[in-house]
Image (tube, coloured by chain):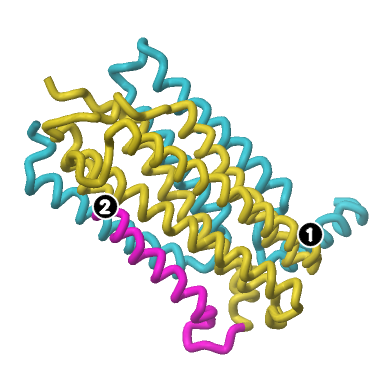
Chain colours: A cyan, B yellow
Amino acid sequence: MTETQVEQRMEGASARRRRGGHPSPKEYVRIAIVLAGITGLEVAVYYIDAVRDFLIPMLFAFSLIKFALVALWFMHLRFDSRVYARFFAMGLAFAITLFVIVLLTFGVFAR
Amino acid sequence: MAETLRHEASHDTSTGLPNTKLAMWLFLASDCLFFGALIASYVLYRGASLTGPYPNDVFDIPYTSVSSFVLLASSLTMVLALSAFQREDPARGRLWLVTTALLGLTFVGGQAYEFTTFYREGLSLSANLFGSTFFVLTGFHGAHVAIGILMLLSLSAMSFAGKLPGDQSFPVEMVGLYWHFVDIVWIVIFTVVYLIPTPNPT
């Protein structure tokens, strides 16, 4: 590695430290473009009759990817201490458990 | 990771992490349960309304899609605000904060227009099960967005007045966490409520 490359790496690391280990504005813009693209796809598949049979799994998959991108990059769960991620995962797990129990109790899946 | 830990270790708490941030994540975790219950109620009563209007009669997907894009864009401007404050550029940070608040206002304004339109078409809180569960779920989400807007505007005003504490980026990060949470809840609502088709009862 050349001296210039080492300096560039050190500068990059220093800038990242100033941002608290968070991504750069360019990375944020890239994530936002991906999110906008997925939202566009979601709306597009809603109107495509050929994928009607797979519509619900596809929509859930798109929604899950968007959810993960926002939580991991914009909310910094990928970069911050794992304790925050555990807190949030605990809340999500409780919410999903509650959701499934309510729907099972009222036989929604059997309809 | 090591960088992050060094950054977090500067906080003089028993966990080495800022208590305010832990409290914010705990609050967001509890809010997951709140929205989980509301979404479960909506799904439970899907297609169970005995009288109209039904979702297919009132929903305008292109209109709501634009609202979703607006809210997603506000998440981007929010992280750009945080990034600017972290780079110690408060002027740019305030600009992004105000932009985020304006995008939030556009979303809430769009929701108010949507609610008014639905009401004119006969859908009210007491019209049928769809109306009750839809207005409660999306109304509470709208209330969260409205609170977020107030937080953003307060933060901008405090920054203008120079009343933000030493590390100006920390309160911005906390408000940002709340704002992104509101965004991810909308990601779920948009899919579950608007995009997944509900057949009209026969």
Crowd around label 2: few <14 · some 14–19 · many ≥20 (10 Å): some
Callout 1 amino acid: Arg
In this view, the residue in front, B51 or A87, is B51
Q: Is residue A41 visible?
A: yes
Kindly identify which chain the residue marked by label 1 belongs to: B
Q: Is residue A93 above or below residue B199?
A: below
Label 1 sits on a secondary structure element that is helix
In this view, the residue in front, B14 or A69, is A69
In this view, the residue in front, B162 or A106, is B162
Q: Is residue A60 visible?
A: no
Task: Name which residue lies at 41% across and 27% down.
Answer: B60
Callout 2 amino acid: Leu
The furthest residue to the top: A50
**Residue A103 horizontal/vertical position (percent):** 14, 45
The image quadrant that residue B27 belongs to is: bottom left
**Left or right of A62 on screen, residue A54:** left
What predominant SS class does the magenta segment belong to? helix
Task: Name which residue lies at 46% across and 71% down.
Answer: B24
In this view, the residue in front, A99 or B14, is A99
**Which quadrant is the C terminus of chain A positioned in?**
top left
Q: Is residue B144 above or below residue B189?
A: below
The image quadrant that residue B1 belongs to is: bottom right
Residue beneath label 2, please?
B38
Task: Name which residue lies at 41% across and 14% down.
Answer: A48
What range of the chain is rendered magenta?
B11-38
Residue beneath label 1, please?
B92
Task: Name which residue lies at 73% across and 66% down.
Answer: B85
